[in-house]
Amino acid sequence: MAFELPDLPYAHDALAAGGMSAETMEYHHDLHHNAYVVNGNKLIEGTEWAGKSAEEIIVGTYDANAVAQNGIFNNISQHWSHSQFWEMMGPNGRAMPSELESRIVDAFGSVDAFKTEFGAAGAGQFGSGWCWLVVDKDGALKVTKTENGVNPLCFGQTALLGCDVWEHSYYIDFRNKRPVYLSNFLDNLVNWENVAERLSNA
Ligand code: MN3
């Protein structure tokens, strides 16, 4: 069974009031994410990875010692990360559930301190990549950043929240202002109920 581009969990213009335009969603979901699905399917066809889950392919093809990851990893990992990313966002007005808030305060000191660390990770990722809030193998909440298509599954971590900092994710709406894109993401776009659900399943 080949991978398929998932529908967005909301309309293309649903996040526009929160700062992510329909034009960004059309490029990012319909074109960029779709390209990872199409290319990933082509690359795994006829290989040992055909029919495997995205998680199995990501863990199985990631090479911690490689300077650059292989095409199968890059495309399937980006497909997985984008599928999570769409779910991690939602229209305005979603408050942070209290259990999640208390875990964040325990780990980072305050919600603002967490946001500062998350934003700094995203702004400090040189070139393309992602920043994340994860549950590490020891159960601790941590902020991380990853390059290109690498994601927390590669390190045995659970992704609670991820933000795409490839230029295609912010250049239409924020031009070169990645830090503003990140602070807007945290303040206006995150679906904290989805993040809390990931935490309770971790
Ligand atoms: Mn992207």
Image: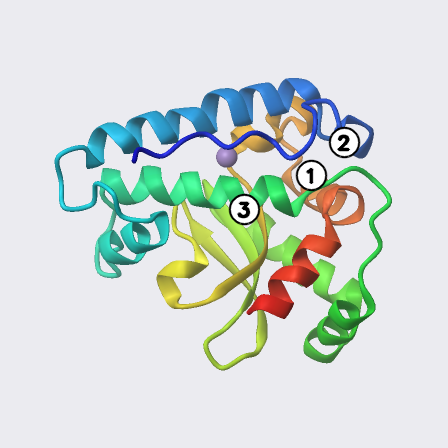
Q: Is residue 145 above or below residue 177?
A: below
Report whether the residue tagged 3 is closer than 8 Å to ligand 1.
Answer: no
What amino acid is labelled 2 in the image?
A: Gly
| Number of other residues with Cα within 10 Å of mark 2, as a class: few under 14, some 14 to 19, many 20 or more | some
Q: Nearer the viewer, mark 2 or mark 1?
A: 2
| Number of other residues with Cα within 10 Å of mark 1, as a class: few under 14, some 14 to 19, many 20 or more | many
> In the drawing, does residue 196 fall left or right of residue 41?
right
Give the image location of residue 190, x and y in percent: 72, 47
* Image disc number at residue 19: 2
- The numbered mark, 2 or 3, whose residue comes first in the sequence reads 2
> In the drawing, does residue 32 fall left or right of residue 103?
left
Which of the image's four quarters has the C terminus? bottom right
Give the image location of residue 89, x and y in percent: 68, 43
To which quarter of the image does residue 42 belong? top left
Q: Which residue is at 79% across, 42% downward?
A: 188
Q: Secondary structure at mark 3?
A: helix
Q: Is residue 21 above or below residue 151?
A: above
* Image disc number at residue 181: 1
- The numbered mark, 2 or 1, whose residue comes first in the sequence reads 2
Residue tagged by mark 3? Answer: 84
- Asked if disc 2 and disc 1 are in contact, CB closer than 8 Å, the reply is yes
Give the image location of residue 32, x and y in percent: 46, 25
Which of the image's four quarters has the N terminus? top left
Label 2, label 1: how far apart the Cα atoms are:
8 Å
Report whether the residue tagged 1 is closer than 8 Å to ligand 1.
Answer: no
> In the drawing, does residue 137 fall left or right of residue 181?
left
Q: Secondary structure at mark 1?
A: helix
Q: Is residue 43 above or below residue 22?
A: below
